């Protein structure tokens, strides 16, 4: 397994944990807040039912979305895959969760079936749609809220942009995989990044900033957006004379006009007047970087 695959795997597990725990907590709060019977038995049963729903349902939605996301190339396709995930997976949840709650004695519906299996089957057949749409209305928005940004960051560049990158590599007489296999030098890394801009906007690299799943590239001439992750660009620029000042910003030494202090903390001002924030954890490193220059 490659290092990139290991990073993606660990990132997926971390996102899964965040989504499941966060969405399940909100699910419990919503169901408790909407309950009128605040007896100890009812709240206990409701908590157990919500835990079963969240800890089973949200991982199921996440797993199906990971599979569908591999086919998505645009935000619209990603939105369709989210909708398909919710509509399909919640159907399974609507069957499995009531069954588990019935087995554990946590079913809290006023017309809950008794101990007979036939009563459970009759209950599922009669109330499936009611349970289904209720879970769609609750779990759907929670799943989108906690996971959209992470999945959006995994979208691949459009085919036209990929073709342009391949064309540039072909003009240089090298294949894309050969370039990635060799460590990038300062000049080649910056040229590779600047080469993604339109010709009138190309110039000396000053800084890059993350904006959702796009990357804003600042040059001495102009700035523009390209579809790319900041982490990928920073990795290619590891040998360049620059520093990551914030989780969303990287600046080159030649682009720094001044280091300024404002109400919100330290910031780096570029020659074009743009100010980029410096995170507290990077403040000492940025000061040392500027002094060394």
Image: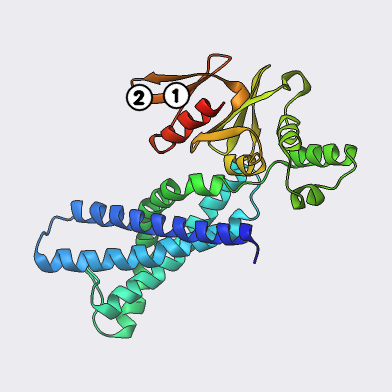
Q: Are marks 2 and 1 in contact (CB under 8 Å)?
A: yes
Residue at screen point 58% across, 39% down: 230
Q: Quadrant of residue 139?
A: bottom left
Q: Which residue is mark 1?
A: 267
Q: Say left or right for 119 vs 238.
A: left
Examine the rendering and report whether any part of residue 123 can be seen: no
Q: Residues within 10 Å of mark 2 (few under 14, many from 20)?
A: few
Residue 69 lies left or right of residue 26; in this view the side is: right
> What residue occupies the far front of the structure in this picture?
292
Total marks shown come to 2
Q: Quadrant of residue 221?
A: top right
Please, which residue is most extreme toward the bottom here? 116
x, y percentage for residue 153? 56, 45
In the rendering, at what x and y percent does residue 191 appear?
75, 32
Is residue 132 at all visible to an observer of this figure?
A: yes
- Report the side of 207 relative to 286 (left or right): right
Q: Residue at x 38, y 59 (%)?
A: 20
Q: Is residue 121 left or right of residue 203?
A: left
**Residue 222 vs residue 161, the one in the foreground:** 222
Counting from the top left corner in percent of width and height, residue 279 is at 42, 34
Mark 2 lies on a secondary structure that is: loop
Q: Is residue 74 above or below residue 124?
A: above
* Quarter the C terminus occupies: top right
Q: Which residue is mark 2?
A: 264
Q: Foreground residue, 57 or 169? A: 169
Residue at x 85% of width, y 38% of height: 167
Question: Judging from the image, what secondary structure is the residue with disc 1 in?
Answer: strand
Q: Quadrant of residue 129?
A: bottom left
């Amino acid at each position: 397994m490659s290092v990139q695959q290991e990073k993606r795997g660990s990132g997926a597990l971390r996102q899964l944990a965040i989504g499941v725990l966060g969405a399940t907590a909100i699910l419990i709060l919503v169901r408790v807040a909407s309950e009128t019977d605040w007896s100890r038995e009812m709240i206990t049963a409701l908590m157990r039912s919500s835990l079963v729903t969240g800890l089973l349902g949200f991982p199921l939605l996440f797993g199906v979305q990971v599979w569908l996301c591999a086919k998505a190339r645009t935000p619209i396709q990603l939105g369709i895959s989210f909708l398909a995930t919710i509509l399909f997976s919640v159907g399974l949840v609507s069957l499995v969760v009531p069954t588990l709650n019935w087995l554990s004695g946590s079913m809290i519906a006023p017309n809950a079936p008794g101990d007979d299996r036939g009563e459970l089957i009759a209950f599922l057949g009669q109330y499936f749609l009611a349970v289904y749409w209720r879970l769609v209305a609750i779990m759907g928005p929670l799943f989108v809220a906690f996971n959209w940004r992470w999945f959006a960051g995994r979208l691949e560049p459009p085919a036209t942009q990929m073709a342009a990158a391949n064309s540039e590599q072909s003009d240089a007489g090298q294949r894309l995989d050969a370039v990635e296999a060799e460590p990038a030098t300062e000049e080649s890394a910056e040229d590779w990044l600047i080469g993604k801009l339109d010709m009138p906007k190309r110039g000396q690299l000053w800084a890059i900033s993350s904006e959702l799943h796009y990357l804003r590239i600042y040059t001495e001439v102009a700035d523009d957006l390209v579809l790319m992750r900041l982490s990928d660009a920073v990795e290619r620029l590891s040998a360049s004379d620059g520093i990551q000042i914030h989780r969303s910003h990287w600046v080159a030494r030649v682009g720094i006009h001044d280091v300024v202090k404002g109400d919100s903390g330290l910031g780096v001002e570029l020659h074009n007047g743009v100010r980029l924030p410096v995170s507290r954890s990077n403040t000492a490193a940025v000061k040392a970087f500027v002094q060394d220059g």
